Image: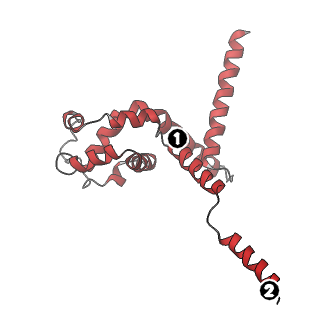
Amino acid sequence: MDAYSWFRRSISKLKNTSLPSIDTHKSQELIKEEESQFYGITDQLIEFVKSLSIETFKNFSLPDEGADGGGNDGNVRQDLSDWQEKHAILVLSKVKELSQLRFRLCPHYLKEREFWTIYFSLARSYIIEYELRAVRLEKLKNISTENGTVSNTSAYEMALKADIDEESENLAATDGEKK
């Protein structure tokens, strides 16, 4: 083996094992941004969450849970849907103020379950459309698997298709009204 071929192989190995390129980094950021958008983490929500205070949570009146004490030991996973759980994780990672509030409030003043019940009640107007879209998407997935057709499309693509179909229906309805 001559030095030139050894050098070429070494260079090609370096190219294959080098750090991720800028394009890979940008695509990862884009995926994270799309995920945040899918779970309703918008600038408006972030600003709203930053405005919450300890008093907001302490003064919020929760409905009585009945004689059972409402509880499953504060286990968030049993109280939240999959979408809400992922939303909670993302919002805690993006809004440090909420994470700090949760740390101050739980478990001294509120149970974990109560904290998230209050949060989702307060943030409802900001996140309801995203949660409904996730529910529709889940229903679409269930229907497609019930029909025996498993597709390779991602959840985001299915949601986008559902939105396009909905827009098409709206346009068709408005065209029908014009005629």
Colouring rule applied to residues: secondary structure
For mark 2, give the secondary structure. Answer: helix
Residue matched to label 2: 3
Image quadrant of residue 175?
top right
Image quadrant of residue 166?
top right
Local packing at callout 2 (Cα closer than 10 Å; few below 14, some 14-19, many 20+) is few
Image quadrant of residue 3?
bottom right
* Residue 130 x/y as whole percent: 50, 37
* Residue 23 x/y as whole percent: 66, 54
Quadrant occupied by the N terminus: bottom right
- Which of the two discs, 1 and 2, labels the residue nearer the N terminus? 2
Residue matched to label 1: 37
* Residue 57 x/y as whole percent: 24, 37
Say which residue appears at 33% left-offset and 52% top-offset: 76
The answer to the question of whether label 1 and label 2 lie on touching residues, with beta carbons closer than 8 A, is: no
| Count of number-bearing discs | 2
* Residue 177 x/y as whole percent: 68, 11
Q: Is residue 3 left or right of residue 125?
A: right
Q: Is 81 rendered above or below residue 175? A: below
The extreme front residue here reads 3
User: CA separation, marks 1 and 2?
Assistant: 52 Å
Query: Which residue type carries mark 2?
Result: Ala
Q: Is residue 168 left or right of residue 126?
A: right
Say which residue appears at 69% left-offset and 27% top-offset: 168
Query: Which residue type carries mark 1?
Result: Gln
For mark 1, give the secondary structure. Answer: helix
The extreme bottom residue here reads 1
Local packing at callout 1 (Cα closer than 10 Å; few below 14, some 14-19, many 20+) is few
Q: Is 1 rendered above or below residue 44? A: below
